[in-house]
Amino acid sequence: MAILPIIETPDPRLRTISEPVEKVDDALRALIADMLETMYDAPGIGLAAIQVGVAKRVLVIDLQEPEEEGGEAVRDPRVFINPEILSASGDLVPYNEGCLSVPEQYAEVQRPSHIRARWLDEHGKAHEEDLDGLMAVCLQHEMDHLQGILFIDHLSKLKRDMLLKKLAKARVRAA
């Protein structure tokens, strides 16, 4: 396993539309293992393959929620290959989103509170499930990456420009 470099905005590769996975094999499972290691190291709760330069419809999520309030975070990684949203609720919920490709910047995004999704896991097994809460938000966020969309694209031009200006200032200070 390896920690892969995460592509950051404004890299044009983030705007690439990812290709469907044709075959779930050992090479894909190795990529998935690297993506999980990269996500945990960042640290983050979701990562799409395009964020590490691979234009395949693959993403990983681990909300790392504790079993009990105030308890230790528990790893429960989930793999989504060729994910599709079959239906989405009409009610939108705001969530303060961030992204490993837009480091240390956060903004409120409105998304459907409940979705029904279908995908393959790392063994090629098909799944279909109703998702809500943070998992629904995270899956929608990561699936946007597969279409070349960043969470900042859901913001008004004014908010997006302000956020990108803050990011540029932070990079100058870090250099």
Image: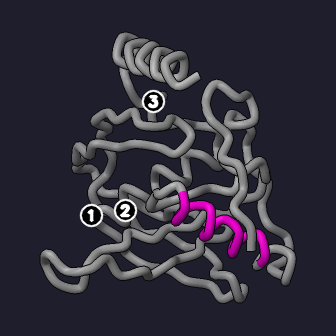
In the visual, does 12 lie left or right of 116? right
Q: Which residue is mark 1?
A: 133
Identified by mark 3, the residue type is Ile
Question: How far is the residue under mark 1 from the one under mark 3?
Answer: 20 Å
Q: Which residue is mark 3?
A: 152
Q: Main secondary structure of the magenta part?
A: helix
Name the N-terminal-most of marks 2 and 3. 2
Span colored in magenta: 30-41
Pointer 2 with pointer 3, Cβ within 8 A: no
Place of residue 153 in the rendered image (x, y in percent of width and height, measured from the top left): 48, 28
Place of residue 146 in the rendered image (x, y in percent of width and height, measured from the top left): 65, 49
Q: Quadrant of the N terminus?
A: bottom right
Identified by mark 1, the residue type is Gly
Q: Which residue is mark 2?
A: 136
Residue 39 forms part of the magenta stretch: yes
136 or 42, nearer to the observer: 42
Q: Is residue 130 above or below residue 42?
A: below
Q: At x 30% / y 74%, what residue is drawn?
A: 65
Name the N-terminal-most of marks 1 and 3. 1
Q: At x 66% / y 65%, what residue is drawn?
A: 35
135 or 129, nearer to the observer: 135
Q: Residues within 10 Å of mark 1 (few under 14, many from 20)?
A: few
Q: What's the mark number on residue 75?
A: none
Residue 68 visible? yes
